[in-house]
Amino acid sequence: MLIPLVVATLALIGAAAAAEAGDTLLSIPEAVLLGVVEGLTEYLPVSSTGHLTVTQDLLGLTETDAAKEAADAYAIAIQAGAILAVLGLYWRRIATALLAVAGRGPDPVGGRRLSVAIVVGFLPAAIAGFLLGDTIKEHLFGVWPVVAAWFVGGIVILTWPAAGGRAGRALEAITVRDGLIIGLVQVVALWPGVSRSLVVILAALGVGLSIAASVEFAFLLGLVTLGAATLYETLDKGGVIVDQFGISAPIVGFVAAFLSAAAAVVWMVSYVERHGIRIFGWYRIGIAAVVAVLALTVL
């Protein structure tokens, strides 16, 4: 039922977009491309913001100040599609945590502890983002900061002792202290290209969680962190996005992000349990080299 519904929705939006085609900077194919890039990279430790920043530059969506403002805001707002994908895939885990907060469910103590750890993990990045958000957009939303973050992150993955391991505590064993440590490390991910998923996974491995638990905690913490950022950015810059990109194309991008994020999450969980995350270190170094060449010759 889902695929026909999505196809029908895309068809209706595509028809509605015809009236906007000559008035907005973002076409339907470009919106689909941005949505797929966002969805595939949001929960992988490769930085969705970094990929979107480079893709938007290649598409010429940042050539004016107004367009760049809209593009930067859209790179955050489009995360809503990826958020809904994880909500759909992890609704049982989320429901269990919510029941635990109310003192119900099969493991109220573990679920309540997980819920508190998520909230504590969210706060440092929320505070830092609120205080430094405009400064970060002004100075770090560019190709070279992203390339640097990709390369350094790749080296960190390849040299991190626990990046290929599986041993460790289950997610239910997480403590409030663990959540605070992970949350403080997550602040580093405000630098585009670093990857929120990467720093959360590595921090969770560092405090002793298993690779599977670390990945799952990154997903759950992302729901709160990304949800807050997306809501704030949409309310603050929604008018700018619509003025520059219209309505239809951003919605198409949202649907594309939802579908591709669901596929990426399912694949990643299966892959990292068997192989760890070292492959993403090589990918980050490779993409950093490719984009550096493009920056010197094309961008």
Image: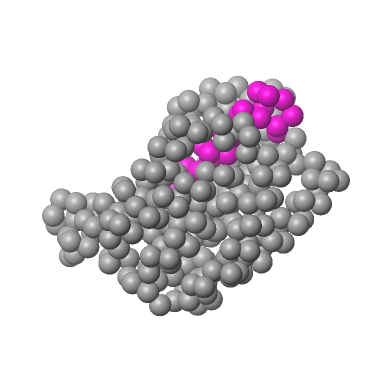
Q: Nearer the viewer, residue 107 or 293?
A: 293
Q: Position of residue 152 (x, y in %)?
A: 63, 57
Q: Position of residue 115 (x, y in %)?
A: 27, 53
Residue found 44% across the figure and 76% down from its top? 166
Colouring of the image? one colour
Dominant secondary structure, magenta: helix
Q: Position of residue 84 (x, y in %)?
A: 43, 47
Q: Nearer the viewer, residue 177 or 76?
A: 177
**8, above or below 155, in the image:** above
Q: Position of residue 279 (x, y in %)?
A: 61, 69
Q: Nearer the viewer, residue 296 or 85?
A: 296
Residue found 58% across the figure and 39% down from its top? 75
Range drawn in magenta: 61-83
**152, above or below 66, in the image:** below
Residue found 67% across the figure and 27% down from its top? 67
Asked whether, in this view, residue 175 is left or right of residue 264, the answer is left
**94, above or below 236, in the image:** below
Asked if residue 104 shows in the view, the reply is yes
Q: Is residue 299 magenta?
A: no
Query: Residue 58 lies in what quarter of the image?
Result: top right
